[in-house]
Image (cartoon, rainbow, N blue to C red):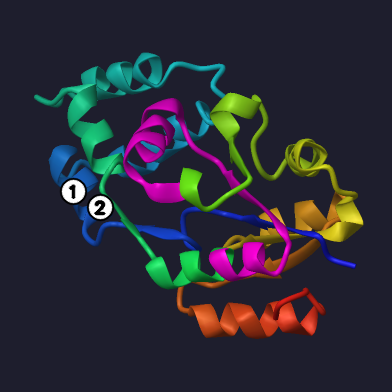
């Protein structure tokens, strides 16, 4: 029996504001490779063990850009929540399920989310990779979260927009649902129902 749902943030509960990539491109003055390298450097910081500024400030210098790390961090913090998806979380808790936010975030963006988005009102556990010291797709990320929820892996479902993360969750013993960016809340409800999740 399913007793818990784990929700990814980006691509499921929230979207980067339209134009974010264009904003990074503009800050990079359109220089080839800048955005790709920027996102690769950010990925190194998801477990909180590498300081974001320490990796993006040298990148700014190497590309000889007249910008600051704060300019880039501000773009990362342009986020639009999806209220209809949060309604699914509300319904899950009303059905007696435990819920967790299970998201990869670097500390600056994750802290902004904690201070400005309503996730604390919706989830039993808020699990940010930079605080856990673990990041998807490491199976240990999922094992740690189900442990915090007090359920067995087979009693939990991970909902994520990235197939590789869902496969990693399944490798850890959880069920998984790939929720594409084009999927809406009703699509998610249907997929939860297909897994016989209580309340759906």
Indicate the quadrant where residue 94 lies: bottom right
The CA span between labels 1 and 2 is 5 Å
Please give left or right for residue 120 compared with residue 129 in the image: left
- Tell me the quarter of the image containing the C terminus: bottom right
Residue shown at the point (21%, 25%) measured from the top left: 70
| 98, 173: nearer the viewer | 98
Who's the residue at 57% across and 84% down the image?
187
Against 148, is 84 above or below?
below
Q: Nearer the viewer, residue 196 or 17?
A: 196
Q: Which residue is mark 2?
A: 20
Whole-percent x, y for residue 107 in the image: 44, 26
Determine the residue positioned at 29% across, 41% down: 77
Secondary structure, mark 1, is: helix
Crowd class of label 1 (few under 14; some 14 to 19; many from 20; radius 10 Å):
some
Q: Which mark is residue 125?
A: none
In the rendered image of this protein, does residue 27 appear above or below residue 86?
above
Identify the magenta region: 90-119
**Disc sitting over residue 23 in the figure:** 1
Q: Is residue 100 left or right of residue 4?
A: left
Q: Residue at x 43, y 35 (%)?
A: 110
């Amino acid at each position: 029996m399913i007793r818990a749902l784990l929700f990814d943030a980006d691509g499921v509960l929230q979207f980067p504001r339209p134009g974010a990539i264009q904003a990074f491109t503009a800050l990079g003055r359109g220089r080839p490779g800048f955005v790709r390298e920027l996102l690769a450097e950010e990925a190194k910081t998801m477990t909180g063990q590498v300081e974001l500024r320490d990796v993006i400030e040298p990148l700014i210098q190497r590309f000889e850009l007249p910008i600051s790390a704060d300019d880039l961090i501000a773009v990362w913090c342009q986020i639009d929540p999806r209220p209809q998806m949060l309604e699914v979380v509300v319904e899950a808790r009303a059905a007696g399920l435990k819920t967790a936010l299970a998201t990869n975030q670097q500390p600056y963006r994750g802290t902004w989310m904690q201070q400005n988005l309503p996730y604390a009102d919706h989830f039993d556990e808020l699990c940010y990779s930079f605080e856990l010291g673990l990041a998807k797709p490491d199976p240990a990320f999922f094992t740690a979260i189900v442990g915090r929820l007090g359920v067995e892996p087979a009693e939990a479902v991970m909902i994520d927009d990235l197939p590789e993360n869902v496969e990693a969750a399944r490798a850890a013993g959880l069920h998984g649902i790939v929720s594409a960016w084009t999927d809406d809340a009703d699509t998610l409800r249907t997929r939860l129902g297909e897994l016989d999740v209580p309340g759906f």
